[in-house]
Image (cartoon, rainbow, N blue to C red):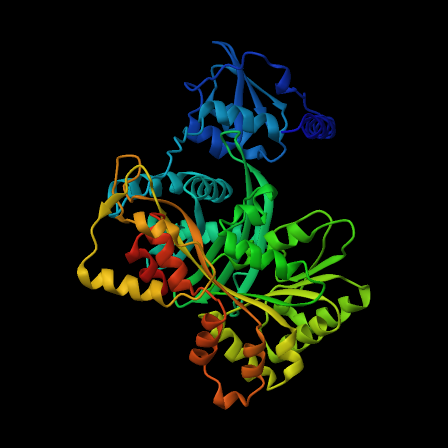
Amino acid sequence: MARDARTEQEIAAQRRAQVLGMPYIDTSQIDNKRLYKEILSTENVKRLKVIPLTADTHSIHFGVTNTTSRKTMDNLVSHFLDQKVTFSIISDAGYREYVLLYDPPQKIEYQDINITPNTDTRSMSMISQTLAQVRPDDMLAYLVKQAFQLGGSDIHLESSATGARIRFRVDGVLHPIAQLDQQRYHQFISVLASAANISTATDEPQTGQINRAYTMATGEEVTVNLRVEAVPAIRGTDAVLRLFNFSSDMLRLDKLGLSPHQDGIIRDIINRPSGLVMMVGPTGSGKTTTLYSMLSELNTDDRKIITLEDPVEYQIEGITQIPIDTHHGGSFAEGLRSVLRLDPDVIMVGEIRDTDTAKTALQAALTGHLVLTTYHANSAAAAITRLVDAIGENPLYASAIRLIQAQRLVRRLDDDTKVKVEPSVELEKHLEKIIHDMQADVDLSFLSNAKLYQSGKSEQNPFGFTGQFAIRELLTMSPEMVSLLTRPSREVTSEMIEETAVRNGMLTMKQDGVLRALKGDTTYEEIFRVLG
């Protein structure tokens, strides 16, 4: 307790003693506090709200608070008939200090969480027992710290008939961590909801955010930066906590692992004064990180950059970031029309979710603004098809699009444990065909010494993977592509768009992934686990 707050409590206790006509004692001034467990047990100290301060064969002096009943004091006098019993008022803080001496809190041993290829029931049991003993605030801080140490991207909380399961997503794969009973899970969800400013009583999905430092009971400080997605499930509230602990230095194009071919295309596009740049992929594919890295590259004194986000995930100095609460009537399209009056050079729209936003973003791109956004689609070609379906055939809109980049995250092989493998004849022919179909201007000189690898394992790394990287396809607007997109949409398929893009130099995600597998960065199986 802060010193000022303790002083205020002592002053209040002293005033109460004066009103009651009783002595007052400031227990903070007692250096060596003695415990008289033979007079009152720990249970009675808690139940009666009374502390024996001094005692000998002739007298006992009790400390009582202003909530100790008169009946309790009379019963103590009647019980200790052979001794003179007296009372003094002490503060609630002083009483709690004594209670902690009588019943010191059990020391919690926080163990680092380890993940293994198979569910480790013993480890899960130990972590579950730890979570059952600590404060709900400490549960959150501990889980976030451990997930961050493991390189996790999400914490999944899944309600069940008996409580809840906790899983971490690490390198794109979910791992069971612990189980909570129902009462404990309800406590945890309540604390989480309060911190994220969401409700556990609603029937609607909700999004919240937590960005604060927690001081655990051990004294350790943990910074928690999360996006919370909560939904009402049949057995309670389920939630996914997306980790955003990051260093702003990491949000740079040269940290994305781009090939020289990809880096050249992206830098050329984003340094143009106008046009639409769209990141495509499912949740958790790194779209937002890529967009923020582009924004960091563009964040110079001669540009005005405004973002519209739901919610704001990374905060960057020098950029105007506007939260759009779409759950309570906010709209990206309305927000975009509003910020156009602020004369921005670059606008980031968190996500295109409807036709109105799509058309407004394209109009902004046509009128001299560089617009960056995200979109949910399986590929760059599929994103174009969906966009055309939404906005209709319009040659102006087609010419406003500069870049559609689709990406997925795959696991990176651990160089210390990976094992070289010889491909089968069938696989070798398959790889040769994929490479033969490439039309992109990429360096293939390494193929003469290319090898395929599979994951190994060690005691330190039982999975054989460490971290993730993105495989990408970058679709740009060639004259042939613009011509194709101005045809009636019923005549244009995503296959036709992809074929045109490849013919004009696009490297597909599959091709990019195969090249990374042949460089030894990942496995062939991992590429097709992610791409399907």
Q: In terms of depth relative to the viewer, which is nearer, 177 or 160?
A: 177
Q: State whether residue 165 is above or below residue 53.
A: below
The quarter of the picture where the C terminus appears is bottom left
| Quarter occupied by residue 10 | top right
Q: State whether residue 26 is above or below residue 353.
A: above
Res. 439 visible in picture: yes
* Residue at the extreme left: 425
| Quarter occupied by residue 466 | top left
Residue appearing at x 80%, y 64% in the figure: 343
Q: Position of residue 322 (x, y in %)?
A: 70, 59
Q: Position of residue 168 (x, y in %)?
A: 39, 50
Q: In terms of depth relative to the viewer, which is nearer, 129 or 60?
A: 129
The quarter of the picture where the N terminus appears is top right
Residue appearing at x 58%, y 79% in the figure: 482
Q: State whether residue 354 is above or below residue 231.
A: below
Q: In terms of depth relative to the viewer, which is nearer, 169 or 210?
A: 169
